Image: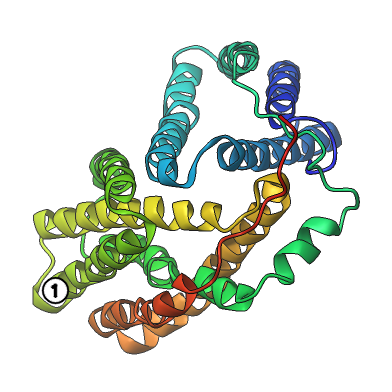
Amino acid sequence: MDRLGRRRHWITACLALLASLTIALATLDAGDIGTGFWVLLLLMVTLSATQDVAIDAYTIETMETRELGVANSVRITSYRVAMFVAGGALIWLAGRTDWSTSFTAGAVTLGVLALASFGLPDASRADAAATTIWEPLRALFRRPGIWWIVLFALLFKLDIAALEPIMRPFWVDRGLSLETIGKNLTLGRVLATLAGASLGGLFTTRYGIFRSLWVLGLVQAFSALGYWWVAAHGGTAERIFGAALFESFAAGMGTAAFLAYLMSVCEKRFAATQFALFSALLALTRSVAAKAAGPAAETMGYAPFFLLTFALAFPAFVLLPRIRRVPPPSEPQLPA
C-alpha cells in the first residue's frame, strides 16, 4: 500500500469488493456451511483488515499533528457506530426477516460507502512512495529513540488489556443476568466510550498530545480502581454499572490521545506500514495480557487483581519524558 496507488483508492476498492462478497454471502445456505463459506470469510476479513490499514494511512497522510486528536475521536465514534449497525441492527433485521435480507442490506450499505469514498479529498504523494517493501521498516527502525516508542506502544494500554478479559466473568459472578449485560451494560459502555473518545479528542487537540497522554492516561489508569472498590466493598448492580461506564469512558479518552501519538510518529509516506506495525504491537499486548489475566485473577481474587491492573498502568508513564525527547519523523519535500 505504501508502494502502489493512493489511500482513497484502496479504501474504495475494499468497500466495493466487500459489498460484492456480502451479496455472495446472502446466497449461501446458512444451514450448510462448507469450504465456500470459509474461503468467503477469509477474503472478507482480509479485505476488512486492508481497509483498516488504508483508513489509518489516509488519516495520517491528510491530517496535521494538531488535528489528530479530533480526527481520532471521529474515527472511534464512527467505528463504534459501525459495530452497533453490524452487530445489532443487521442481526435485528435478520430476526425480523431472514439472513439473506440482512446480508443484502449490509451489502447495500457497503456499496453506498464505496460510492461516497470517491468524494474523499486526495493528498498528493508524488515521489514519496516506498521503492521497496522493506523501505518503510528500515526508515522506522533507523530513527533515533524508536525502541523507546515501541516499548511505550506495548505498555500504554497494558492495564486495560489485562482488565477487559476479567470484566465479564466478574459481572456474571456478581449475579448480573445475561440480559442485563447484553441490554444495559453493552449499550451503556458503547455510549460511554463514544463520549470519552469525543472528549479525549477535543482535549488532545486543545492541549497537545503529550499533556493529553499524561492527563488522559491517568484517568484511564484510575478506572481500574472503580472495579477494585466494587470487588472489595460489595458489588450491587448499580455499582458495577457505574464502574463499567467509568472504565469505558476513561478508556475512550486514553485511546484518543494514544492513537494520536502513534499516528504522529509515523512518516506520512510510509503511514500504512508503520502504523500497521504499531497496531500489531497493540494486538500483541492484548493477546499476552488476556492469556495471563485469567490465571492471575483466579489465583489472586478479583480485588487484588484489579489493584494489579491499576499498577500496570504506570510503567508507561516512566517512559513519557523519554519519548518526548525523540525527534519527530522527517519527511521529504514534495514537488509543488
Where is residue 251? Give x, y as percent: 33, 56
- Asked if residue 134 shows in the view, the reply is yes
Residue at the extreme bottom = 299
Left or right, 117 with respect to 211, comes to right
Quadrant of residue 255 in the image?
A: bottom left
Which image quadrant: the N terminus?
A: top right
What residue sits 34% from the left and 54% below the top?
208
Percent x, y of residue 242:
14, 55
Q: Which residue lies at the image location 71% right of the left edge and 64% below the top edge? A: 140
Nearer-the-camera pick, 161 or 102: 161
- Give the quarter of the image for residue 61: top right
Q: Quadrant of residue 288?
A: bottom right
Please say which color scheme the image uses.
rainbow
Q: Which residue is mark 1?
A: 229
Task: Spot the residue most to the front.
Answer: 336
Query: Looking at the picture, does residue 174 appear above or below residue 60?
Result: below
